[in-house]
Image (tube, rainbow, N blue to C red):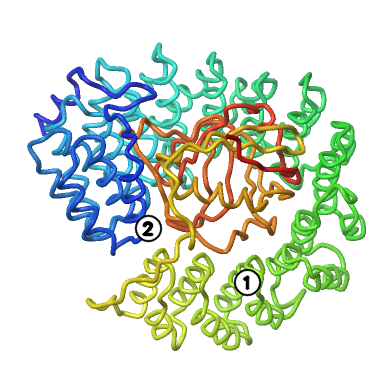
Amino acid sequence: MAAVLLAVVAGTACQPSKHGSTLVAPANRALRVEIAQAESQREQGVARLLALRNELHGAERWLAVRGLGRIGTATARAALRSDLQSLDPSVVAQAASALGVVAALEQIPDDESQVISDELVRSLAAVADQLPPVLEALGRAGTVSAQPVLIKALQSRDSRTVEIAALALGRYGRRKLLLRADAVDALVSSSSHSERDVRYAATYALARQVVPPKTDGAVVAPEIRATVLALTARLSDADAEIRAVAAGGLGRRLAWVPATPALVAAIADPDWRVAIEVIRSLAEPNAVHVARAMLQQLAELPLHNDVYKSHLIGAALESLPTKNAPAEVVLFATAVTQNAALRGRLQCLAQSLLQLVAATPAFATLTTCGGTAFDAGDRAVIIAEVIKTGGGELAARQAALQTLLASSAPAVAAAGLAVVDGTVAPWSVVNAALRSPAAVVVGAAIEAADRGIEANVAEAPELAATLLARAATEQDPELASSFLSVIGKHKLAGGAAVCANVRAHPVVMATRAECLKAFGASEPANAPAPFVAFAPGLAPWPQAVRWQLETSRGRIDIMIDGELAPWHAAVIRDLTERGFYNGLRFHRFVGNFVVQGGDPTGTGWGGPGFVVPSEVGSLLDGDPQFGVGSVGFADAGKDTGGSQWFVMHSRAPHLEGRYTVIGHLTAGVNTAMQLNVGDTVQRARLLP
C-alpha cells in the first residue's frame, strides 16, 4: 500500500489533457466498424475482441479493450483482470479503465467486487504517469477500502489528479458508499481550491456524500457540519454550476441542519439553475416557514426571460408541501408568462395544489385546466394525484378515475392505474391492463399488480396468473425485466419455470438470474446465450454526424460523435432520414438536469422498435462528459437505448460511464435551456 500511496502523491509527467487523452483516436474506420460489430454480438464477439487486443497497440488496442468493458461478461472481465498484471503501464491503464466501464454499467457481480477493487488499487503502482484513468475506475468500481488512495490523490501537486480523485469520491455517493471522515476533510479543503474544475469536483463530491439515516436524538456527525459549512461557502462561488451543486447538496441535508440564511438568499441568484436548486431545497418539509415567501419572491424576480421564470415557478409548485399551498399560487402561475403552453402547465400545477387541500376536490376544474395547450397525459397525472389523497366523496373520485382508465390515450390510462387500490377502482382493471399492447399501460399495470399481490388482495391469484402468462412471451426488455422482478420478489407459484425459459434481450438475463436465485435456482452452466437483435438492418457509422433540429423554441445544432458511439450515430441518421423525430414532443424536463425527447408515444416508454448497445467511454476517450449542452441517449438499463435523447443543463458526473454520450450542442444552448414538457421537434435533418 505504501508504494501505491507514494505513486498517487507524486506529480505526474504525462497526464491526459483536460479535454483530450493520452491516446490519439485513430481514423481507421474499418477497424471501428469491426469492433462495433463485435461489441453488438456481446458474448459471441468476445473472442474477436480478445484477438484484436493481442494484435493491436496503443489507441487502436484501446478500442478493443473498451469493447470488452462494454460487453462485461465473465470472459471479458477475466481478460481485463489479467491485463492488470502486465508490466506495460499503458496496458494496465487500459485494463483499469475498461473495468471502470464494466462497473459503471453495473456488470460486476458482488462476489468479484472487492477483489477487483483491490486489484485496481494495486495497479496504481504500475501507472505512476497515467493515474487519472485508474482513479476514475476506482470511483466506478472501488469499494470503501479503496478510499485511502483517493484521499492521498487529493493531496497531489497536479490539479487534474486532484479533480479526478474528487469526482471519484463523488461517485461513491451515487453508489451509496459512506465516505470516511478524512475523505470529507480532504474534500472540504479542495472545495476552496483556486482552480474552478477542482472546486467543482470537490463540491460535487460533498453534495453527493451519503448522509447516514438520522434517528431521534441523534447527534449530527461532525463531517456533516463540515460539509454544510463548505457547501454554504460555495453559494457565493463565481461559477454558477458550483453554486447550483452546492445548493442541491444543502437541500439533501436539511433533515440534519436547518436552511441557512445564505441558502434562502440564493433564490435570487441571477442564474436560474441555481435558483431552481434552492427552490427544491427550501420546499423540504422542515423549511415550510419559507414556502409562502418563496412563491412571492419568485413572482417578483427580475428575470429577463419568462421561460426561465416559468421553470422556477413550476419547480416551486411541484415541490411545495401541500399543506402550505396558498390560494394566491393561481395568480402567480397565470401572471408569470404570456406563453399559452407554459401558462397552461402552471395553471394546472397551481390548481392541483388547491384541490389537494380542498374538502371537496373540483375534478371538473382539473379536467379542463390548461386547455388545449396542456397535454392530456400530464394533466392525468395531476388528477390521479388528487384522487390518491382521498379527499371528497368516494363516488366523485371513482368517477374521475373511471374517466382516466377508460381513456384511449395510453398515458392517461397509465396515470389512472397508478392509483388503483381496489376501492376507487376494482383490481380487475389491472388484469385487463396487463394484456395491453401499450408499454406505458403495461408498465403501470405491473406496478399496480405488485401492490395488489403485496397486500394479498382477494384478486391476487388472478393478478399473479396474468403476470406469469404475459412474462412468458414478453419481448420488450424493460417490461420483461419488470415482470421477472415482481415474479421473483413474490416467488409466484410457477414463476421459476417462467424465469428459466425466458430468453430475451441480454439485459433481461441479469434480472432472470435474480429471479432464479429467489427460487433457489441458478443459471445452468450450459445456458444458451441470449438472443441479440440490436438495430436490425443498420451498420455502425464511425463518423461525425451533424444533426439540426428546428424546435418550437428555436434551432439547435448537435454534433454526433460517431467515433465514440457508432451505433448511436447510425440510429440518429436512420431515424432522421425516415422523418421519425418530426413532430415529437419533449416529454421530460428536470430543471438544472435535462430536457428529454425522442419518444413517439410521448410517455417515456416508447421507441423505434429496436434497441442499440450501450457505447459508454472513459478518460481514455478524451473525457466524454455529461456537461452543459452534452447530448446523451436514454435507456432503461444497459443495451436498451432506442430513440430517446436528452440535453444536459449542467454537468452530471454520475451519468458518465452509465449512459452513452452521443455528442454536444454546437449552436442553440440557450434554446435548449428553454425547452420544456410540451415543446416539440418540428423538423430534424442531417447537415452535410
Q: Describe residue 217's horizontal placement relative to residue 292 as left or right.
A: left
4 horizontally vs 666: left or right: left
All told, the count of numbered labels is 2
Instruction: Measure the C-alpha gap from mark 1 to mark 2.
Output: 28 Å
In the picture, the quarter occupied by the C terminus is top right
The residue wearing badge 1 is: 442
Q: Which of marks 2 and 1 precedes in the sequence?
A: 2
On the image, which quarter does residue 219 sit in?
A: top left
Image x and y of residue 457, in percent? 62, 82
Which residue is rendered at x = 27% and y = 44% of the image?
98
Between 479 and 384, which is closer to the camera in this rendering? 479
Q: Nearer the viewer, residue 438 or 428?
A: 438
Q: Which mark is residue 40?
A: 2
- Name above or below for residue 493 compared with residue 39: below
| Label 2 Cα crowd, 10 Å radius (few <14 / some 14-19 / many 20+) | many
Q: Is residue 8 above or below residue 346?
A: above
Amino acid carrying label 1: it is Val
Q: Position of residue 368 (x, y in %)?
A: 90, 55
Question: How would you rate the neighbour count of disc 1 (Cα within 10 Å): few for under 14, some for 14-19, many for 20 or more?
Answer: many
Percent coordinates x, y for residue 57 in the rendering: 18, 38
